[in-house]
Image (cartoon, rainbow, N blue to C red):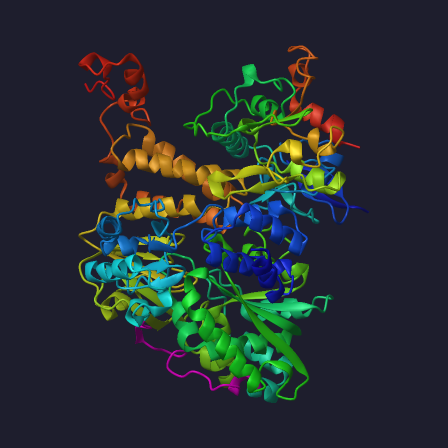
Amino acid sequence: MSKTITIDGQEIPFQDGQTIMDAAIEANVYIPHLCHNPDYTPHGSCKLCTVKVNGRNCSACTFPASEGQDIINKSNDLEKDRKRITQMLFVEGNHFCPSCEKTGNCQLQAVAYHLDMHDNHFPHFFAKREMDASHPDILIDHDRCIFCNLCVRASREKDGKDVFAISGRGINKRLIVNSKSGQLKDSDIELNDYAAHICPTGAILIKRTGYQVPIGQRIYDHQQIDEVALAKEHK
Amino acid sequence: MQSFIQSVINKYEVSPVRLLHILREVQAESQHISPEAIELIASGLNIPRTQIISVVEFYNFLHLTPRGKYDILISDSITDHMLGKQNLMNYFASQLNVTIGEIRPDGLVNLDSTSCTGMCDQGPAGLVNGYALTHLDRPRIDAITQQIEQEIPIEQWPAEFFAVADNIYKAGLLLQSPVEKGEALKARYQRGLTETLSEIDISGLRGRGGAGFKTAMKWRFCSEETETERYVVCNADEGEPGTFKDRVLLNSYAQQVFEGMTVCASIIGAEQGFLYLRGEYLHLYEKLQNILVERREAGLLGANILGQDLNFDIEIRLGLGAYICGEESALIESLEGKRGIPRNRPPYPVSQGYLNKPTVVNNVETFMAAAKITVTGGQWFADVGTKQSDGTKILSISGDCAKPGIYEYPFGTSIAQVLHDCGAYDVFGVQVGGPSGTFISAQELDRVLAFEDLATGGSFIIFDQSRNILDMVKNFTHFFAHESCGFCTPCRVGTSLLKKQLDKIVDGHGSAGDVAALEELCQLVNNNSHCGLGQTAANPILSTLQRYPELYEKKLKQISYEPGFDLDASLATARRLANRNDAGAHLAQVEED
């Protein structure tokens, strides 16, 4: 007899050591997320995966599943908060979807559509962030960084390097590169590193690959992010 | 440079967990952490340079670009403002001929603000090169300016500039009868382990930082972990604006605090303890180090304490200006030489704390009380207080009253009683528990100090009728935006949005709908943030909005929409480019009708 949790009334089995997110993905239940990727240590920072566990808000990606948890994933309140949190990410950086190479392949954009976001709601910060185009193959457009920490984790956990780190505090948070000059060209990153391909937005792009897939034929042009995420993450 | 940095690294035993101390000494030597220093420290400690950069950028007292030789910071607590901080700071800037927030061109001095320095009973206060300055007024500023212009080292400045008084006005159970050196440890071994823990349980002692977790339960959980390498941590990072009791406890009762930590170590089986001292209390560092030396010499720390086979020592680690490090898991990250980012929980520190080993983190006052309870037994403590809140609470009282200072009260004491004792009249309201606590109005003074009513870590700020309460709300809201660690989206972006939205209203640019939008944002930040900082960041707005909605509504313009930015100022560049400044090149903010 396996242990179970309940998500929106549906009984879902789990094993000890699994988080709520792990159990949900295994049961084909989508919980919106941006900083989470099942291949890496959970981070718990974007807060899109906030669910109500026995009445208390918890991050599904980091909170351990335990017997008898009654979890709400879909409710008007949660969906509204998730939309607002996504809007916060949009106004914090500078996201111009129509002119971004990642449009249609971008998880931030796809989550926004999924959450029925039609405007930015909050006043923009108009952050001044510089681009790092120094590397021959890889580009960093800091305007689009949402601090999901995935490139930091990918570099450390998969590539065995420490190319990226998060610096600054509060609203001055920023992504930094581990090289003496601070530029990507002087770091250890290589084109085939996981860290170069993990970015959920258009902050880290591979040069000379832009627009190879035309707009209209991209991942989220035809599918919602929940289907795509489950198809990819459900193993 | 290389030999100096190597010597500092060696002094701290090439230990990356002591990175903050290493950076502190390098910063003191060269007023910043230079790119060269970053490379040397990174290779010396064998850590990525990004760890150093990110730590420097995280802590307020570290800098990547040079500060003045005299780095002057003025406390930005609301109590400092109530004592005329802004005027005084402008005066200071004119005397020093320096622009606030900038370094003087000759590099000698800079003047800036910093979050509450814990001197609210003797402000306006500040820091010079990390050392506390109290009772700032114009004559004192003139005198300080003179010392700086003559480039006199601060060690040679008059001692009165740095005098810090305890200001204990009401001593209760704990403050009136401190334990003798070694008394609690002797009692601990006479009673035995189980019996001592049981006395602490009987006492009902709950964490004094404000969260109120039962101390005996925390110690028991930690002692039951299978991992046997365990740690004791004393949280002396009291950064909640308006709190300064730990400053006084460590100045005058440090023996007892260390004794409480040692009792805890003997119960949970720890060999190493840490006092995490907020950087603002640098002035206490040497004194506390000397007390530790005394205790080692007396056989109360070190190997085989009291001949009881107990090996335990305490190390003091200094913070560097980050309110968030008062959160216990952020504090542990900081102890490990990292940015103070609160961890995901579970696991909790009692099972995976410092270096992922079981760790008890308690407040200064908690350890002090535990030492006394070990001597006198638990009932003595439990006899005082309310049903859910046993014993006494030490308050840091500041703001509009005759005698700001330290007061110890049994739990259950009414706010009215407290106000009477400290000489507060014509009270408009009281902020209990600091910005993250609750604002109560003059109609609620029969409420009591207790976990079940007004829980507090000790901050108690009084406002009289002459005060504009929105100034307080603004100060607190800016404080949270400044201190947010930035880890999670709702707090990182939300606290800055709260600041923008509140300023829009308070500065008279709000219109219909803006107060509702503010309230919605408050709920969003409180409900979705990762840790206590974000979860309480909207409290100052929420608790005043609930009590005085009319204060907010009065600020609104009678129009349907008002942009959040200054329309005319935004056209300045266009005017410059067009070389126009006639009436037609200006726009009214909104056509009033």
Residue B227 point in image, percent of width and height: 73, 66
Direction right: furthest residue: A1
Image quadrant assignment for residue B167: bottom left
Image quadrant assignment for residue A115: top right
Asked if residue B341 lies in the magenta stretch, the reply is no
Q: Residue at x 32, y 26 (%)?
A: B565
Image height check: is B194 above or below B413?
Answer: below
Q: Is residue B224 left or right of residue B456?
A: right
Residue B441 point in image, percent of width and height: 27, 53
Image height check: is B583 above or below B201?
Answer: above
Q: Residue at x 62, y 46 (%)?
A: B49
User: Which of B235 and A117 lies nearest the eye of the viewer?
Assistant: B235
Q: Is residue B492 visible?
A: yes
Image quarter of the C terminus of chain B:
top left
Q: Is residue B335 visible?
A: no
Prevailing SS of the magenta stretch:
loop
Image quadrant assignment for residue A202: top right
User: Which of B176 and A227 lies nearest the eye of the viewer?
Assistant: B176
Residue B130 point in image, percent of width and height: 41, 60
Image quarter of the N terminus of chain B:
bottom right
User: Which of B404 and B92 lies nearest the eye of the viewer?
Assistant: B92
Point out the stretch of residues depicted in magenta: B165-185
Residue B99 point in image, percent of width and height: 30, 44
User: Which of B339 and A74 lies nearest the eye of the viewer?
Assistant: B339
